[in-house]
């Protein structure tokens, strides 16, 4: 089985029974903030796009690049489609010209002509990607590969049960705006970033250990930030709180925990994977590439300046009345929302920064009032979250009718944020569901989740706790760590205070816990 690195989470898998192109991403995503790292735009995409199958793991724009799919991927390719709860991905691909679809039943092996086997695991909670993320397992001629991508299943048993895996490709770096955009003192930001960076690596080691594949390929990040306004997010400034470590950092951290089977794929690297080993060729020595990372970024930044400027020029729509636009877009959804609105539980404020005709800065403050189910001007009140961003970005979102502000505004990192109290996952769940179809799905999911009684208990240290994590049901026999009165679930790092059951990371999500009976002597 041949695996060609094509940048970020993207790869082309070639076997004698057919080829699969996965997640090709080349054009900048999220308001021109994310670019693939290392740059992959000079690859021979005409040739790479001539494949038998296309697999897009999910709709995040660094995985689903509509322009690239339209221009460079043959429409003869059969799309291997995860079983997602909404039809959005299939609809978007159809609109791009794809006509052949194979809807892969969730977690079932499908045999394709020529003996190529695939299995797709779709994750479908409202917090998995933009309503759905997935992983692809492939087997041909005894060689097995798992493209886990950036999916975070609670465990990898379903793949491990299909036999020993030879190539495991997974995410290891950050892909979020936390903590960089928060208005915090620098020392706090660094401390939170450091924690997050460690947690990302811990999670990666856990998955690697789960599968014990012959070879581990770090993929799906980090992106690079080429706009001058975001340049500081690249991990080239010696900031230990930077959440975007690159593949060379992965190798050195992996070595510290005894990992010796890591293989980095640069765009254009080719790994030939067999049941007895892997040989890899690279377009240039990997160490040399990372030693010159800063120069590479500076060179691509110059090359992409025009692209960024052109995108920026398309955002402004001064004719749009943002308050009225947000009102008509969001109020009907607030009316429909029970769980998400209750989960947010307070007003969320947007400060929109623009300029007036004389070039002076203006700020319009708009509140999405979840309890009051209204969008209205800010009224000098306490708010749960405050986001400050350029007015033009919201104008653009309204102009294009964007249904997912996480997969556009928030991932762009082109905002700053402040909040009172804990992280609130419902805020982001709501802003990624700005359509009735998505909102209804998310509401239904939370409804079922709340009702499901998770009866099984386990003992961890001095505590008896429910077996499944109240966040996304990770098995706490594997992911739970108790330290004194506090439990940490290592899948996403959420913490719980055991005496009260309170979740310390997010609103809601209480855990059932009781002290074990101390045996009487
Ligand atoms: S499942 Fe996310 S922290 Fe436990």
Image (cartoon, rainbow, N blue to C red):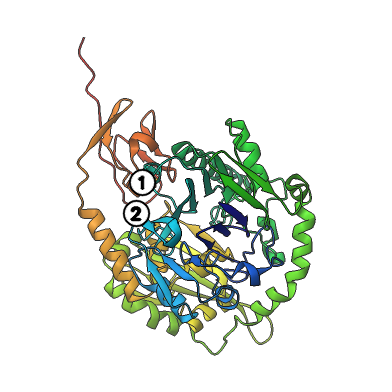
Furthest residue toward top: 521
How many labels sit on residues? Answer: 2
Label drawn at residue 273:
none
Residue 187 vs residue 306: left or right? left
Where is residue 375 drawn, in percent x and y?
39, 76
Residue 11, percent from left and from top: 58, 58
Give the residue at mark 1.
158
Q: CA distance from mark 2 to mark 1?
A: 7 Å
Picture layout, residue 260 above or below residue 364: above
Instruction: Choose between 484 and 354: the one closer to the eye.
Output: 484
Instruction: Name the N-terminal-most of marks 2 and 1.
Output: 2
Which element type, helix, strand or loop, lies under badge 2? loop
Q: Are marks 2 and 1 in contact (CB under 8 Å)?
A: yes
Quarter of the figure with residue 519: top left
| Residue nearest the viewer, comparing 97 with 122 | 97
Q: Determine the residue located farthest toward the bottom in the rendered image.
A: 319
On the image, numbered disc 2 is attached to which residue?
Answer: 107
- Residue 113 drawn above or below residue 259: below
- Residue 231 in sight in this render: yes
Q: Residue at x 78, y 68 (%)?
A: 302
x and y percent of residue 451 in the render? 20, 54
Quadrant in the picture for the C terminus: top left
Q: Residue at x 42, y 43 (%)?
A: 491
What percent of the width, then of the height, locates residue 134? 42, 57
């Amino acid at each position: 089985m041949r695996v060609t690195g094509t940048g970020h989470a993207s790869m082309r898998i070639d076997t004698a029974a057919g080829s699969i192109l996965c997640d090709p991403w080349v054009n900048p995503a999220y308001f021109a903030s994310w670019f693939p790292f290392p740059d992959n735009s000079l690859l021979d995409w005409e040739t790479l796009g001539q494949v038998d199958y296309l697999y897009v793991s999910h709709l995040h724009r660094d995985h689903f690049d509509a322009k690239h799919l339209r221009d460079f991927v043959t429409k003869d390719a059969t799309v291997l489609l995860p079983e997602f709860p909404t039809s959005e991905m299939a609809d978007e691909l159809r609109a791009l010209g794809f006509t052949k679809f194979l809807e892969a039943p969730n977690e079932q092996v499908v045999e394709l002509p020529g003996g190529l086997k695939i299995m797709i695991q779709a994750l479908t909670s409202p917090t998995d990607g933009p309503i759905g993320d997935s992983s692809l397992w492939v087997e041909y001629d005894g060689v097995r590969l798992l493209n886990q991508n950036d999916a975070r299943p609670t465990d990898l048993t379903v793949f491990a049960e299909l036999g020993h895996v030879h190539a495991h490709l997974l995410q290891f770096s950050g892909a979020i705006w936390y903590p960089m955009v928060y208005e915090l003192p620098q020392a706090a930001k660094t401390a939170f970033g450091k924690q997050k960076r460690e947690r990302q690596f811990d999670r990666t080691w856990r998955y690697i250990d789960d599968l014990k594949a012959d070879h581990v390929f770090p993929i799906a990040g980090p992106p690079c930030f080429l706009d001058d306004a975001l340049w500081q997010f690249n991990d080239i400034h010696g900031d230990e709180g930077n959440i975007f470590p690159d593949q060379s950092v992965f190798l050195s951290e992996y070595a510290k925990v005894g990992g010796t089977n890591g293989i980095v794929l640069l765009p254009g690297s080719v790994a030939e994977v067999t049941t007895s080993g892997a040989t890899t060729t690279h377009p240039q020595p990997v160490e040399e590439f990372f030693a010159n990372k800063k120069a590479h970024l500076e060179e691509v930044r110059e090359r992409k300046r025009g692209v960024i400027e052109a995108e920026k020029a398309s955002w402004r729509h001064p004719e749009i009345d943002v308050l009225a636009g947000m009102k008509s877009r969001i109020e009907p959804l607030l009316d429909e929302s029970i769980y998400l609105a209750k989960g947010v539980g307070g007003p969320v404020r947007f400060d929109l920064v623009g300029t007036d005709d004389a070039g002076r800065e203006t700020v319009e403050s708009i509140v999405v009032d979840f309890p009051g189910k209204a969008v209205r001007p800010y009224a000098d009140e306490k708010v749960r979250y405050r986001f400050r961003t350029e007015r033009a970005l919201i104008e653009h979102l309204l102009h294009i009718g964007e249904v997912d502000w996480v997969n556009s505004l928030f991932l762009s990192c082109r905002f700053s944020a402040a909040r009172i109290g804990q992280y609130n996952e419902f805020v982001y769940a709501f802003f990624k569901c700005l359509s009735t179809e998505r909102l209804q799905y998310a509401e239904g999911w939370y409804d079922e989740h709340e009702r499901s009684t998770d009866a099984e208990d386990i003992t961890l240290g001095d505590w008896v706790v429910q077996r499944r994590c109240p966040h996304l049901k990770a098995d706490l026999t594997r992911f739970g760590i108790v330290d004194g009165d506090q439990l940490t679930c290592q899948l996403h790092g959420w913490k719980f205070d055991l005496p009260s059951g309170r979740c310390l990371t997010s609103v809601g999500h209480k855990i059932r816990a009781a002290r074990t009976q101390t045996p009487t002597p």
